[in-house]
Image: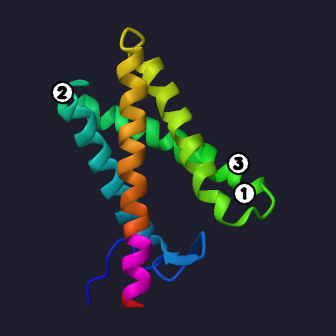
């Protein structure tokens, strides 16, 4: 019997909002978001696709770490987690893109906004689809 690299960790559940997801689902979901945001960067002529993918990875890495850290220490604010996370994510990713390409300040913030709005729509759609099929 062949085991996937995630087989030993696939039963560990990770709380994300009101969802409990296994680690494999979270990794696949984050990879999908990363590819989507890198395509947005590339589509807006940010850079070549490999550079756009690297920049999307760096901005998402910073965003995920900081947003989860901040939201972990916030008191329970209910539904306000979503707007807080989105605003923090836009600010962090805009800052990272600005640091990566200082000469394109307006484009960096526009891309951070567009990429996060698309990602937020995907996340909300995934939550509704998961709730619909569960």
Residue at 38%, 58% (x, y): give it.
121
Q: Locate residue 129: give its quadrant.
A: bottom left
Above or below: residue 8 compared with residue 118: below
In the rendered view, tell whether residue 109 sits above or below residue 87.
above
Most frequent secondary structure within the magenta stretch: helix
Q: Is residue 21 above or below residue 55?
A: below
- Which span of residues is magenta-colored? 126-132
What secondary structure is found at the residue carrying circle 1?
helix
- Mark 3 = which residue? 70
Q: Nearer the viewer, residue 109 or 9?
A: 109
Residue at 61 percent of width and 48 percent of height: 67
Residue linked to disc 1: 72
Q: What's the residue at 39%, 24% (across, down)?
A: 108
Packing grade of label 3 (10 A; few <14, some 14-19, many >=20) is few
Q: How many marks?
A: 3
Q: Along the line of sight, which residue is nearer the eye, 53 or 44?
A: 44
Can you identify the residue that label 2 sits on? 48
Among numbered discs 1 and 2, the one appearing first in the sequence: 2
On screen, residue 20 versus residue 51, left or right, reads right
How much space separates mark 1 and mark 3, taking CA atoms?
Answer: 5 Å
Neighbours of disc 1 within 10 Å: few (<14), some (14-19), many (20+): few
Q: Position of residue 75 (x, y in %)?
A: 81, 60
| Label 1–label 2 contact, CB within 8 A | no
């Amino acid at each position: 019997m062949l085991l996937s690299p995630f087989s030993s960790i696939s039963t560990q559940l990770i709380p994300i909002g009101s969802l409990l997801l296994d680690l494999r689902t979270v990794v696949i979901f984050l990879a999908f978001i990363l590819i989507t945001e890198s395509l947005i960067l590339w589509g807006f002529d940010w850079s070549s696709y490999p550079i756009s993918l690297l920049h999307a990875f760096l901005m998402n890495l910073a965003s995920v770490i900081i947003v989860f850290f901040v939201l972990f220490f916030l008191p329970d604010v209910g539904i306000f987690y979503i707007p807080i996370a989105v605003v923090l994510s836009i600010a962090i990713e805009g800052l990272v893109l600005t640091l990566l390409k200082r000469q394109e300040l307006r484009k960096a913030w526009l891309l951070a906004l567009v990429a996060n709005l698309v990602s937020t729509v995907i996340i909300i759609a995934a939550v509704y689809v998961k709730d619909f099929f569960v």
